[in-house]
Image (tube, helix red, strand yellow):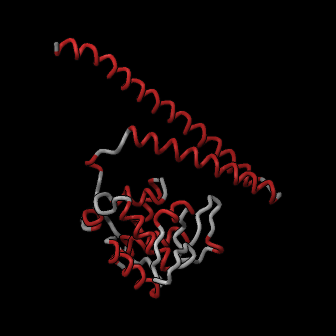
Amino acid sequence: MLKNILLFFIPFFFLISNQASANVLEWQQEKEKIEQQRNELKQQLLAEQAENKKIKIVMKDNKLAAYEKAYEQAINYMQPGQAAQQISAEQYFNNPLIKIKPGQKVPEEFIPIYKAAAEAYGVDWFVLAAIHSVETNFSQIKLMLSYAGAIGHMQFMPATFLAYGVDGNGDGIKSPWNLEDSIYSAANYLIASGYKTDIRKAIWHYNHADWYVNDVLARAGRIKNG
């Protein structure tokens, strides 16, 4: 009886497995096409002089970026990273093999805000500072509005801030344009993204790119040891 049941279900298992592999391959191919299209748009943007046409190119790129991110998330869902690749914040920054260069300068007036937010949510203040540095050069970027639609001191997409934004200064208003709200919201987002168990993955949620994660961690290490 058991043998008959197994013989019945095994073909379905291989069908599902093969279908999943086929889906991932198709998604990867589509993602590569989108990457090529976005590269072409970037070249067009560099060559274009008319502001109205530049805006149209950026809007088209934003739409493609959303599709690219959707494919990337689907691929990662079907092919998740192995647990052995996960690393906590404590493991990362206490690892003697991590080579850290000193000297990353942080505006002193921001440090108490980073530390208060870090203590409130259980993250590292120097990681918050590093993200702030990467995103807006410590709020020195004019308008603090990216071409992709990210806003505020810590560059949240509006939908993300709606989900994870908090009132950091206690004035009853949650705003990505308020420095304390933005930093506290970043801490909230990191901890919600699994910061305690996998720091790389948590930072990756902020910007889905390995170069971004590496940059944030390198700056965080310099800030911690500076």
Residue 119 is left or right of residue 109, and the answer is left
Q: Residue at x 39, y 77 (%)?
A: 117
Seen from the viewer's position, the closer of residues 215 and 22 is: 22
Q: Is residue 8 above or below residue 53?
A: above
- Image quadrant containing the C terminus: bottom left
Q: Position of residue 172 (x, y in %)?
A: 50, 80
Q: Quadrant of residue 13?
A: top left
Q: Position of residue 143 (x, y in %)?
A: 65, 73
Q: In this image, 160 relative to 124: left or right? A: right
- How far across and down, in percent of the image, does residue 126 sit? 38, 74
Q: Residue at x 37, y 62 (%)?
A: 192
Q: Quadrant of residue 67?
A: top right
**Along the line of sight, which residue is nearer the eye, 136 or 43?**
136
Against 30, residue 113 (above or below) is below
- Identify which residue is drawn at 61% across, 71% down: 144
Q: Nearer the viewer, residue 148 or 84?
A: 148
